[in-house]
Image (cartoon, grey):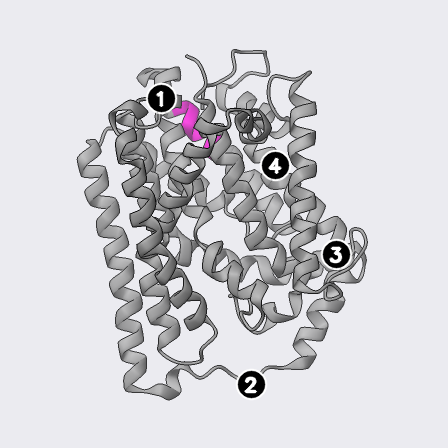
Amino acid sequence: MSRVREIDAIRAFALLGILLANIGYLADPAHIALGVLPEVDNPVGFAVSALVLTKFYVIFAFLFGYSFTLQMRSWGEDRVRARMLRRCLALLVLGLLHGFLLWFGDILTLYAVLGVVLLLMRNIRPRTAVVVGSCLIGFLTLVWAALGWLTSLDPTAAEMPAADPAAGARAVHLVTDGPLGFLTFQAENYPPYALFVWAFQGPTALALFLYGLAAGRSRLLERRERWEHLIPRIQWTGFLVGLPGAVFFAWASGRPDEFALYGLAVNTVTSLFLAAAFVVTLLRALRRFPALIDVLGPAGRMTASNYVGQSVLVALVFTGYGLGLAGRLAPPAVMGVAVAIYVLLLWLSARWLRSHRQGPIEYGLRAVTLGTGRRTPVNPA
């Protein structure tokens, strides 16, 4: 079964968004001691919150579910259960190492657990998968809205404690104080933030897994001719609904009242529209400029290696593992570093795949998944 190269390109595109969303936390770790959302009091922070934050991990989650269907076809029903369980176990171990050593916001452990849930639901009908996913999104939206309403009844409940400059200074000190200091920072922050990632992203990720499962069972990306005429409508609807919701979310996330929760409620829905608009816009660009697939595709084939590679390079720039520049660069410079890291990884991915069939982490995951270290045909997912 041949690879669906557009999926690789979309994965690589999602990697850029994830890097832009994540890099700010280690570039300016002081605000980690004060909250979990990036600051929006500057144009760069506002743009990242509106256009990037939560928009790209939903693309990533959708592709996880879609790729699972490709793996099921490749492996066969008689082998999918054992192989997927081994793959999820490998992701869990990799995620724990990644979370403690490099990036406290790791999502691989979440994907490992939800991957088992997806395995149990693998025979669900596509229509039912969409309904269940939509119910999850709707329930989460209502929860945020209800919390906002309850907060409006007691405005003091939303008041944040006064910022502690000493806590922010300590975070920057730990991050930049050599490897041991950074590991101390990781050990303190990874467990609570892992719980936050599971609670905040878990329901949405599962919903997108199910959407991806439904799309994969219907071969949506492999049979674009059936819906390609709808792309302009999806694109404009996505932007018209998604952009106002994104702006409201970014504006609300900086407020100390119930509007922050209302922003989360709106964003839970509208981020899906904006993510869909991003994806179909990319698909149109790939159709018009096919060379983009050659540029983006290698990184998309090495998603896990690039995801961890981003964390390694960010840590080398901002933490005590390397230059220790945390807290020293202005937001535009931080975005410049992110783009430089992304371009470097695109180049390294292309170079690596000239002489290897898959990325270094992908090779390990595949060996565990298949229960062998022997060379096997490249999986289409």
Circle 1 residue: 72
Give whichever of discs 3 and 4 has the lower sequence position: 4
331 or 153, nearer to the observer: 331
Tell me the element at label 1.
helix
Residue 2, x across and y down, in percent: 44, 14
Closer to us: mark 3 or mark 4? Answer: 4
Question: Does the stretch in magenta take in 87?
Answer: yes
Cβ atoms under marks 2 and 1 closer than 8 Å: no
Name the element at disc 3. loop
Q: Tell me the crowding category of disc 3: few under 14, some 14 to 19, or many 20 or more residues within 10 angstroms, Cα based.
A: many
In front of the other: 357 or 187: 357
Which label is found at residue 319?
3
Check disc 4 and report the residue beneath it.
306
Magenta span? 82-88
- Residue 213 position, x and y percent, is 31, 33
Circle 4 SS class: helix
Lower position in the chain sequence, tag 2 or tag 4: 2
Q: Residue 40 appears at what percent x and percent y?
A: 53, 69
- Residue 364 vertical placement versus 22 (above, below): above
State whether residue 180 appears in this view: yes
Separation of marks 3 and 1 at Cα, in angstroms: 40 Å
Q: CA distance from mark 2 to mark 1?
A: 51 Å
Q: Quadrant of the N terminus?
A: top left
Marks 4,1: beta carbons within 8 A? no
Residue at the location (45% across, 77% down)? 255
Q: In the image, what residue type sits under mark 3?
A: Thr
Q: Residues within 10 Å of mark 1 (few under 14, many from 20)?
A: many
For the residues labelled 4 and 1, the Cα–Cα distance comes to: 24 Å
Q: Quadrant of residue 182?
A: bottom right
Q: Mark 4 or mark 1, which is nearer to you?
A: 4
Assign the magenta stretch its main secondary structure.
helix
